[in-house]
C-alpha cells in the first residue's frame, strides 16, 4: 500500500489533505500538538472507519525534532513492510510577528517553512526514490516580487515578518526546483502548490495583535481548505507525472523569475550547511 507523509496535518490545509488522501493511501500525519492530532485522527475515522492513518508528534521548528520524527517514521515503515513511501507533503508553516529563533538560532519562519521540509525530505528521500514518488511543498503567490537576502537570510539586521514569510515561500519553490534538477532522473518529481487565500489559522498562531487582527479579517474571504487539498491529490495521482513545477487549482501557473537553477543550487548549498547534511552523500 502506498503511504504519504503530511506535515502540519492536524488542522487547516494539512488536515483536509489527510482526510482526502486517507481514502486511497496510508496517511502518516505530523503535528505539533498531541491533542489536536488525536482529534484530527478521530474526525477522519468518524467519516471513514476504514481509513489507514497514524500521527506522529514533533515541533518541526527544531532540527532535532525533524531528525527524531524522520527516524520514527522510517522505523514505522520498516516494521510495516507492506507500505511504500510514495508521497511527502511539506505543508507545515508559520507566521511570526517578531524575530524569533529556533534552538539552532535560525529565524523561525525560515526554519519551519523551509529548512524543516529540506531536512525531512533528505531523511526520507531514499524511500521516496525507491517508490518513484512525489514531493509537494505548500507555497504561495507571495514568493513573487522578492529576492533571497543572501547576505542576511535570517533577516537579523532588519526583520520584517512579511518579508520573512515571502522569502520562505520563494525558498519552497527553489527547493522544489533543486530537487527536480538533481533527482528527476531517479524517477521522482517535486512540486509547489499555491493554495490561494484559505480560511486557516496560520496567521493567528503565535502572532502579534496586528498580524492576528489582519489575518482574522482577511481569511474570511478565503476558500475552505478542502478546495486546495484537491490539487495535492491531483499531483500525487496524475500519471504520467505532471511536468510543471508550480500549481494552483490543479493548473500549472507561472512563477517568479528568481526561480533559476543558479539560485536553487545556492540555496541548496546554504541549506545543507545550516542542516549539517549533504544530499550528494545520500545512499539511494
Image (cartoon, helix red, strand yellow):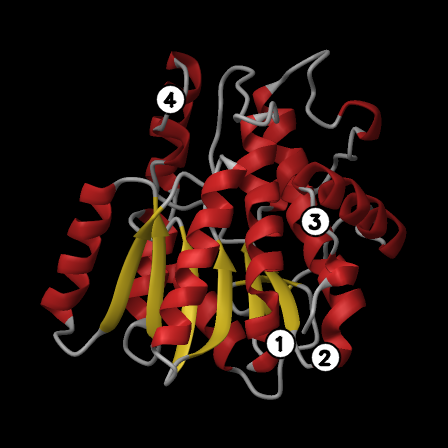
Q: Nearer the viewer, residue 282 or 134?
A: 282
Query: What distance separates the C-alpha of mark 2 from that of mark 4?
Result: 43 Å
Up-down relation of residue 231 to residue 119 (above or below) = below
Quarter location, residue 284: bottom right
Numbered badge on residue 129: 1
Instruction: Answer whether residue 70 is visible to the viewer in this image.
Output: yes
Foreground disc of the pair 4, 3: 3
Instruction: Answer whether residue 225 is visible to the viewer in this image.
Output: no
Numbered badge on residue 277: 3
Residue at 45% x, 42% y is 65
The local secondary structure at tag 1 comes to helix
Query: What distance separates the C-alpha of mark 1 from that of mark 2?
Result: 6 Å
Residue at 77% x, 79% y is 185
User: Label 4 belongs to which residue?
Assistant: 212
Name the side, left or right, on which 188 lies relative to 120: right
The local secondary structure at tag 4 comes to helix
Amino acid at each position: 500500500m502506498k503511504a504519504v507523509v503530511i506535515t502540519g496535518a492536524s488542522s487547516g490545509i494539512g488536515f483536509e489533505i489527510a482526510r482526502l488522501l486517507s481514502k486511497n493511501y496510508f496517511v502518516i500525519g505530523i503535528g505539533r500538538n498531541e491533542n489536536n492530532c488525536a482529534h484530527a485522527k478521530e474526525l477522519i475515522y468518524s467519516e471513514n472507519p476504514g481509513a489507514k492513518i497514524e500521527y506522529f508528534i514533533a515541533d518541526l521548528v527544531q532540527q532535532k525534532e525533524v531528525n527524531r520524527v524522520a527516524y520514527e517514521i522510517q522505523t514505522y515503515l520498516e516494521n510495516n513492510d507492506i507500505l511504500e513511501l510514495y508521497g511527502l507533503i511539506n505543508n507545515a508553516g508559520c507566521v511570526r510577528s517578531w524575530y524569533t529563533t529556533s534552538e539552532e538560532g535560525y529565524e523561525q519562519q525560515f526554519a519551519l517553512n523551509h529548512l524543516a521540509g529540506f531536512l525531512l525530505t533528505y531523511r526520507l528521500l531514499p524511500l521516496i526514490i525507491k517508490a518513484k514518488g512525489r514531493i509537494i511543498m505548500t507555497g504561495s503567490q507571495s514568493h513573487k516580487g522578492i529576492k533571497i537576502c543572501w547576505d542576511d537570510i535570517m533577516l537579523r539586521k532588519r526583520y520584517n515578518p512579511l518579508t520573512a514569510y515571502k522569502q520562505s515561500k520563494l525558498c519552497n519553490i527553489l527547493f522544489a526546483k533543486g530537487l527536480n534538477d538533481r533527482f528527476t532522473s531517479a524517477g521522482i518529481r517535486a512540486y509547489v502548490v499555491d493554495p490561494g487565500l484559505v480560511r486557516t489559522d496560520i496567521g493567528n498562531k503565535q502572532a502579534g495583535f496586528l498580524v492576528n487582527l489582519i489575518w482574522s479579517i482577511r481569511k474570511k474571504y478565503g476558500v475552505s481548505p478542502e478546495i486546495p487539498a484537491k490539487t495535492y491529490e491531483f499531483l500525487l495521482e496524475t500519471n504520467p507525472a505532471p511536468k510543471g513545477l508550480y500549481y494552483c487549482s490543479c493548473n500549472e501557473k507561472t512563477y517568479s523569475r528568481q526561480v533559476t537553477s543558479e539560485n536553487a543550487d545556492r540555496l541548496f548549498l546554504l541549506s545543507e550547511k545550516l542542516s549539517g547534511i549533504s544530499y550528494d552523500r545520500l545512499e539511494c
